[in-house]
């Protein structure tokens, strides 16, 4: 498999996980505000509103746990960056929020069988 092919497969897997996560979170009553928002400091996968709380959601999708679970891929440093990005998003959009919460949706897409989705609220 070439690097280009591997990269395309990884991107497709990531898009799949983000779509699955977005559907799940909206079904939980959240309102999707933005997807894949970028600035010079980084990217937010999903931005949602849960009542008066702004939810920044990191989505990690894996095809196996050979290199760790989706949850193990999110470090304290990543959580701190997501919090800073949330403030930037609010400033750029001119939006106010009662609070900011960082959530994680881990998606495991095995070769066979259904995908497993785990939503963890308030990781940082």
Image (cartoon, rainbow, N blue to C red):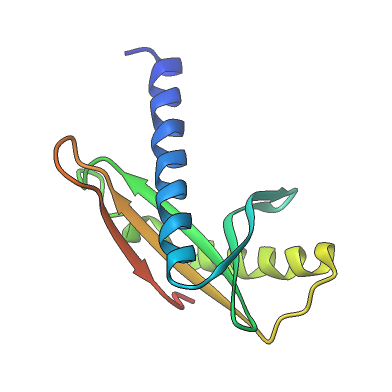
* The one of 42 and 50 positioned closer to us in this rendering: 50
* The one of 88 and 33 positioned closer to us in this rendering: 33
Which residue is farthest top?
A: 2
Q: Quadrant of residue 75?
A: bottom left
Residue 19 locus on image (x, y percent): 46, 47
Q: Image point 20% across, 46% down: which residue?
A: 114
Q: Image point 62% across, 70% down: which residue?
A: 83
Give the vertical position of 1 relative to 13 (above or below).
above
Total number of numbered labels? Answer: 0
Q: Image point 25% across, 45% down: which residue?
A: 67
Which residue is farthest bottom?
A: 98
Q: Quadrant of the N terminus?
A: top left
Residue 57 locus on image (x, y percent): 52, 63
Residue 115 locus on image (x, y percent): 24, 48
* The one of 95 and 74 positioned closer to us in this rendering: 95
* The one of 1 and 46 positioned closer to us in this rendering: 46
Give the vertical position of 71 relative to 67 (above or below).
below
Residue 97 locus on image (x, y percent): 71, 81
Q: Image point 38% across, 55% down: which residue?
A: 73
Give the vertical position of 17 relative to 86 (above or below).
above
Is residue 16 rendered to the left or right of residue 88? left
């Amino acid at each position: 498999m070439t690097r280009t092919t591997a990269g395309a497969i990884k991107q497709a897997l990531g898009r799949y996980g983000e779509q699955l996560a977005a559907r799940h979170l909206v079904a939980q009553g959240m309102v999707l505000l933005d997807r894949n928002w970028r600035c010079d400091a980084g990217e937010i996968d999903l931005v949602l509103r849960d009542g008066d709380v702004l939810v920044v959601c990191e989505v990690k999708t894996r095809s196996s746990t050979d290199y760790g679970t989706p949850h193990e891929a999110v470090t304290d440093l990543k959580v701190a960056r997501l919090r800073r990005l949330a403030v930037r998003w609010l400033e750029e959009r001119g939006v106010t929020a009662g609070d900011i919460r960082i959530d994680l949706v881990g998606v495991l897409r095995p070769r066979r069988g259904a995908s497993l989705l785990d939503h963890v609220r308030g990781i940082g």
